[in-house]
Image (cartoon, grey):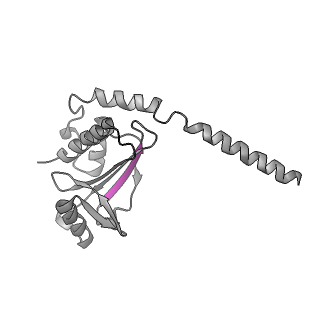
Amino acid sequence: MKKIWILAAAAAFMMTATACGAGDVGGASSGASSSQASSSSSGPTVAQSSVEDSLKGLEKYLTGNGVLSGDAAEMRADVIGAKAGGRYQFSYNGKNNVTVELYEFDPSGLNGAAKQVLDSVKSSGQFTLMGQKITAVLSDSGKYLMIYQDTVAKDENKAYADKVTKLFKEFKNS
């Protein structure tokens, strides 16, 4: 009986300790993100010409211009017919509220899955994967696809998403 009480007390303590962690959602990290965004609002600080035309180059370009942070987790790009893919999750006016997935396609060697995804995104701005509709954006060059999700619906977050999308779409469009 004594062991049960000790386990119950430990569980109650764990619940109390973890509940305290959610107090300042978007506190310090949102300030850093806001200043990061304002410092690069005058225009890109990393030129497209300084990075290669690849997924790594796109990631370096977006990171260098302050709209992407953290390390990319490798994605199973072959599921949508892409050549390579990476996923970023970071905070902007929230706590781990932004997820950005970037994919690179080989325009000269598209398989059936890639053609279906790209055609769907071109026509409707979304594609279906495992029964779910996923909103996505194609770069103007047609070589890259971005999935951008933000769980915070503030005006600043929408403006930030627009900024990320603008830089993404313009990448290596020549």
Residue lying farthest to the bottom in this orientation: 112
Could you say which quadrant of the image residue 115 lies in? bottom left
Q: Left or right: 132 with respect to 16?
A: left
Q: Can residue 71 be seen in this view?
A: no
Residue at figure coordinates x 20%, y 51% from the top left: 139
Residue drawn at (79%, 50%) of the image? 7
Residue 12 in view in this figure: yes
- Outermost residue to the front: 154
State the residue at coordinates (34%, 30%): 36
Q: Nearer the viewer, residue 154 or 136?
A: 154
In this view of the protein, which residue sits in the foreground, 52 or 85?
85
Looking at the image, residue 65 lies above or below residue 147: above
Quadrant of the rendered structure where residue 74 is? bottom left
How many numbered marks have been drawn onto this rendered protein structure? 0
Q: Does the magenta stretch include residue 147?
A: no
Residue 142 % position (x, y): 17, 56
Vertically, is 149 above or below 132? above
Estimate the x, y position of residue 93 in percent, counting from the top left.
40, 35
Q: Which residue is drawn at 39% across and 42% down?
A: 152
- Is 11 located above or below residue 120 in the figure? above
- x and y percentages locating residue 39 in the rendered image: 29, 26
In the foreground, 132 or 105: 132
Q: Is the magenta stretch mostly helix, strand or loop?
A: strand
Measuring from the top left, give residue 174's x and y in whole percent: 11, 48
User: In this image, 85 relative to 117: left or right?
Assistant: right
Q: Quadrant of residue 37?
A: top left
- Image quadrant for the N terminus? bottom right
> What segment carries the magenta color?
84-90
Task: Name the residue furthest right.
Answer: 1
